[in-house]
Image (tube, grey):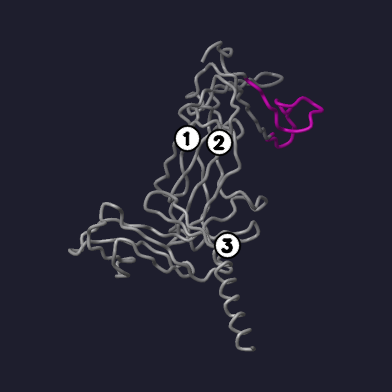
């Protein structure tokens, strides 16, 4: 009786182990030839991943290699992935010619409190900001940057997904130094009000670990930071000073007729050895050295796009 009870307990334990494992492991296709094994690395040990060389090679004698080392044969095989030891699995014919491949990556289904490995926080005061995006004008172009962790400088971008919630596509390309990316909404219109937010997700890979970073949805007008302006003329008067400013080159790319405004912020420093001089930006009684001048871009909003 005791032996039967022990046998039943062992069977029940195995069933619970299988059920528990199935809850922690998810296999998804990220893009062609790339599989992602989503697991909780706190409890994950190993799992089986099915691979196929493809229907076009059903009648071919196929051998498989993992990172160059033989791992099996047949058009369809199952490989065992332990911890983060995934890899690039390629299939070949009898002559050793390459036929196809599948890159298997591991992604940690981490909670909000678990520390990321590849990127570090862009702002210490915001633990959820890993990617920061800025635009120089309202043309539809913007640039995003990030900071890699100390020991993850070799990490690379696997995939970028960017689009407006309205459905319009946003095209992006990674910078040559892999420290950021440049994006453009080709359907953006500086004449009209921006109502649909942009959603940006970037997938990073280091070795065979994959991490996903998504920005808070944003509008172009929320991230516009123009370059500093040029002073092209300055004239001193008895009681003040007149300064002529010009828009920066990148700002001038925006069509002249737009509803958006450009703000100038100015700082002045009074330099005097003995006799104080009047701050020409702030009359007596003003609270600070900064004065904001609001200038509407030339022209009125057109009636039509």
Q: Which residue is mark 1?
A: 170
| Distance Cα–Cα, label 1 vs label 3 | 35 Å
* Residue situated in front as seen by the camera: 190 or 241: 190
* Disc 2 crowd, CA 10 A, few/some/many (<14, 14-19, 20+): many
| Distance Cα–Cα, label 2 vs label 3 | 33 Å
Establish if 10 lies above or below 225.
Answer: below
Q: Dividing the picture into quarters, in which one does residue 49 lie? A: bottom left
Establish if 218 lies above or below 43.
Answer: above
* Disc 3 crowd, CA 10 A, few/some/many (<14, 14-19, 20+): few
Whichever of callouts 1 and 2 sits on the residue coming sooner in the sequence is: 1
Magenta residues, dominant SS class? loop
Circle 1/circle 2 CB separation < 8 Å = yes
Helix, strand or loop for disc 1: loop
Q: Position of residue 211 (x, y in %)?
A: 51, 55
Q: Position of residue 133 (x, y in %)?
A: 55, 40
Q: Which residue is mark 3?
A: 23
Quarter the N terminus occupies:
bottom right
Helix, strand or loop for disc 2: strand
> On the picture, is 11 further left or further right than 282?
left
- Range shown magenta: 270-295
> On the picture, is 194 further left or further right than 69?
right
Q: Position of residue 39 (x, y in %)?
A: 53, 62
Q: Position of residue 236 (x, y in %)?
A: 63, 21
Q: Is residue 277 magenta?
A: yes
Q: Which residue is mark 2?
A: 198
* Residue situated in front as seen by the camera: 111 or 189: 111
């Amino acid at each position: 009786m005791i032996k039967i009870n022990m046998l039943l307990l062992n069977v029940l334990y195995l069933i619970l182990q299988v059920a528990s494992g199935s809850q922690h492991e998810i296999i998804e296709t990220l893009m062609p030839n790339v599989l992602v094994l989503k697991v909780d690395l706190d409890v994950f040990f190993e799992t089986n991943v099915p691979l196929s060389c493809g229907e076009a090679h059903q009648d071919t004698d196929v051998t498989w290699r993992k990172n160059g080392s033989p791992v099996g044969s047949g058009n369809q095989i199952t490989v065992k992935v332990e911890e983060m030891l995934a890899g690039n699995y390629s299939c070949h014919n009898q002559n050793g010619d390459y036929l196809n491949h599948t890159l298997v990556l591991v992604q940690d289904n981490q909670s909000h409190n678990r520390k990321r490995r590849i990127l570090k926080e862009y702002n210490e005061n915001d633990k959820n900001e890993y990617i920061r995006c800025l635009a120089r004008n309202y043309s539809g172009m913007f640039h995003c940057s990030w900071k890699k962790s100390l020991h993850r400088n070799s990490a690379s971008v696997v995939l970028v997904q960017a689009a407006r919630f309205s459905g319009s596509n946003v095209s992006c390309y990674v910078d040559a130094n892999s420290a950021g990316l440049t994006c453009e909404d080709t359907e953006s219109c500086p004449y009209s009000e921006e109502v649909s937010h942009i959603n940006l997700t970037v997938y990073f890979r280091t070795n065979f670990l994959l991490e996903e970073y998504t920005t808070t949805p944003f509008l172009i007008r929320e991230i516009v930071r123009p370059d500093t302006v040029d002073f092209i003329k300055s004239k001193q008067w008895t009681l003040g000073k007149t300064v002529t400013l010009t828009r920066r080159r990148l700002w001038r790319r925006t069509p002249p007729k737009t509803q958006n405004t450009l703000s100038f912020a100015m700082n002045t420093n009074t330099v005097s050895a003995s006799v104080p001089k009047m701050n020409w930006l702030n009359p007596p009684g003003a609270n600070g050295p900064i004065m904001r001048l609001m200038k509407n871009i030339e022209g009125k909003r057109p009636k039509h796009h």
